[in-house]
Amino acid sequence: MRLFAAVLPPAHAVDELAEAVDLRVRGLPGADGMRWTGRAGWHFTLAFMGEVDEALVPELTERLERAAHRTRAFPLRLRGGGHFGGRALWAGAAGGIAELRRLAERADAAARRTGLAMEEHRTYRPHLTLARTRTETDLRPYAAALDGFEGTPWEVGELALVRSRLPVAGVPGEQPRYETLVRCPTASPADGGR
């Protein structure tokens, strides 16, 4: 099964971002030619594990639960936008970015300790993918349209282990489907976290 660890924004944060994207971005020239990520797919990937043998899921879950519990709950909000080259448009984050990075590092370490072959370690860059393009596109105007967007803060209180089912080839407009398998709570302030 294809798995990743993620932080899932709450409904109010998704609604705010969707309104900003609809009002500021989707009406721009060329936006109709982009592949927009459905709201149900909006998340901050912490660690992408790829195909995981089902027999490893219990150990992976246990290690992710420990990683989450070692992290104190922290504030986060959606903010602004950016792009990776000319292929991916994203919304950014603000608030507990250091804590989000630490949680991503812990999720990656949990996967490695489970025996999963992870990609080369890179500095974590928090982003929520909004759209992709099939061809190289100047995404600067789309990212700039989100300048000044500030969502309402929320408290990140869990890490989610998510299963991704890719779309069937040849079905126009079909999106990946995501299923949250496990929710791993972070430490409460009383627990302390480390």
Image (cartoon, rainbow, N blue to C red):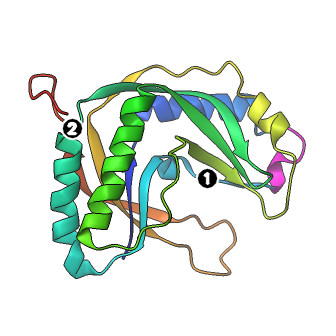
* Image disc number at residue 37: 1
Tell me the number on the disc at residue 186: 2
Q: Is residue 99 above or below residue 85?
A: above
Secondary element at image label 2? loop
Q: Is residue 27 visible?
A: no
Q: Amino acid at mark 1?
A: Thr
Number of other residues with Cα within 10 Å of mark 2, as a class: few under 14, some 14 to 19, many 20 or more? many
In the image: residue 89, left or right of residue 116: right
Dots 1 and 2: beta carbons under 8 Å? no
The x, y position of residue 15, in whole percent, is 51, 32
Q: Tell me the quarter of the image containing the C terminus.
A: top left
Which residue range is magenta in the image? Answer: 28-33
Q: Residue at x 22, y 48 (%)?
A: 67
- Vertically, is 119 above or below 31? below
Picture coordinates of residue 125, whole percent (x, y):
55, 42
3D distance between C-alphas at marks 1 and 2: 27 Å
Residue at 16%, 23% (x, y): give it. Answer: 189
Residue type at mark 2 is Thr
Residue 42: where, in percent of width, then height?
51, 47
- Secondary element under disc 1, as helix, strand or loop, is loop
Q: Is residue 90 visible?
A: yes
Residue 150 is labelled as: none
Q: Can you tell which quarter of the image residue 173 is in?
A: bottom right
